[in-house]
Image (cartoon, helix red, strand yellow):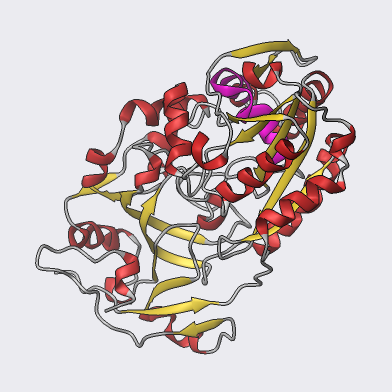
Amino acid sequence: MTDFPQVFRIRQHFPAPRLGDVAGEVVRQLSKLRLSERVQAGQTVAITAGSRGIANYRQILQAAVEYFRRLGAEPFLVPAMGSHGGGTAEGQLAVLASYGITPETVGCPIRSSMETVLVCQTPLGFPVYFDRHAFQADHVLVVNRIKPHTRFVGPIESGLMKMLLIGLGKAEGAKVYHAAIEDYSFAEIIQVVAQQVLRRCRILAGLAIVENAYDQTALIEAVRPEEFAEREKELLQLARQWMARLPFDEVDLLLVDEIGKEISGTGMDTNVIGRKFDDHKAVPGERPRIKRIAVRRLTEATHGNAVGLGMAEFCRSQIFEEMDVAVTRLNALTANHITAAMLPLDYPTDRQMLQVALQTIGLRPPAEARLLWIQNTLQLAEVECSAAYWTEAQSRPDLQILTPPRPLPWDPQGNLPPFAALAQL
């Protein structure tokens, strides 16, 4: 019989710059670039819409659409999400609809297709693909959040430049560039592909978004195409400073309530769990160091895409019922991250899952385990921590202790409540 650790709830205090008027800032930033001098009445403007769960996403896109309508242009949205949504036009529309982004809510058409144009061959020997609808538009506005990538490391990671490659490259482009990673660095691929796209695909501007640690919009900035690379490097440093982290670096077991594509491209953010370079452990110098990860469910918004599950050692059996195997495998194969779709050991209840997991953490008794319990890797303001952290938590000015240590609240079936509901108990 396993003795489980007691847990207490803490609230983390992060730096939290936040925009008050998101829509107004979109208009101010686009106006700053004097785009009215370049966009003529009647011209079409393709605006990218990706698959990530960006804060205020619909409002940002609405404001951009309205801005171009006031110029007399004809804006439309283009799903720019590689192979996500099952790699189908209908699936990508469904992803946007799950964020409340539809033609009715944003005020313009959404032209969804997996068709691409072969733009050119790069000097490195692989082709450049670009969404056909965007390629045929008079202008393209690239909209994306700037943040550390879950697998690639460099001065530019996830943001405007990546959207030029993988988002607008659709499934064909995403597959090519992820394959090229086996032979070239991400920095080399970005440089050579973005150079061709910026030269040949009528990129008008970028709208860069940076969020704070509470998943709120902290900064929106319009960027000229020729400034994408340098400005994105600077914004990435801001994103690193503002991102949320786990409260402790040494963890025996991380219990994650939910994973999903809207949370992270890898289901759970490898920058948060310390598994950016190895799916099952931190490499030297990487933090945090987590021995085991257990996952309870998939989010609804992930539409069955369980990519990232392979980074966990344990999961609830119900995940296999929620999982769309074909969609998950397609995403893993396109990203050339095969292990992300592999299956962990599964158990029907939380009690059974944790009981087994706590037997694998080493010599530390289960009751004294360093356990952290989170909702997901995007929402880390509040964390359930085992009693092993109690003494350190009391001395940390960045942590507010919300409850005393208390037993895990098992129900009669041996399951735990959702993480959010635990705050009410």
In front here: 103 or 268?
103
On screen, residue 391 versus residue 221, left or right, reads left
Question: Picture quarter containing residue 78?
Answer: top right
Tag count:
0
- What is the magenta range? 159-177
**Residue 332 visible in the displayed image:** no
Residue 200 at x, y percent in the picture: 81, 18
- Does residue 7 show up magenta in the picture? no
Residue 128 at x, y percent in the picture: 70, 16
Residue at x 79%, y 50% (from the top left corner):
29
Q: Relative to 280, is 287 above or below?
A: below
Question: Picture quarter containing residue 74?
Answer: top right
In front here: 313 or 201?
201
Main secondary-structure element of the magenta-colored stretch: helix
Q: Relative to 406, is 24 above or below?
A: above
Residue 321 at x, y percent in the picture: 22, 39
Q: Quadrant of the N terminus?
A: bottom left
Q: Quadrant of the C terminus?
A: bottom left
Residue 237 at x, y percent in the picture: 75, 56
Q: Relative to 222, is 7 above or below?
A: below
**Residue 89 visible in the displayed image:** yes
Residue at x 68%, y 62% (from the top left corner):
21
- Does residue 163 show up magenta in the picture? yes
Q: Relative to 220, is 152 above or below?
A: above
Residue at x 71%, y 56% (from the top left corner):
24
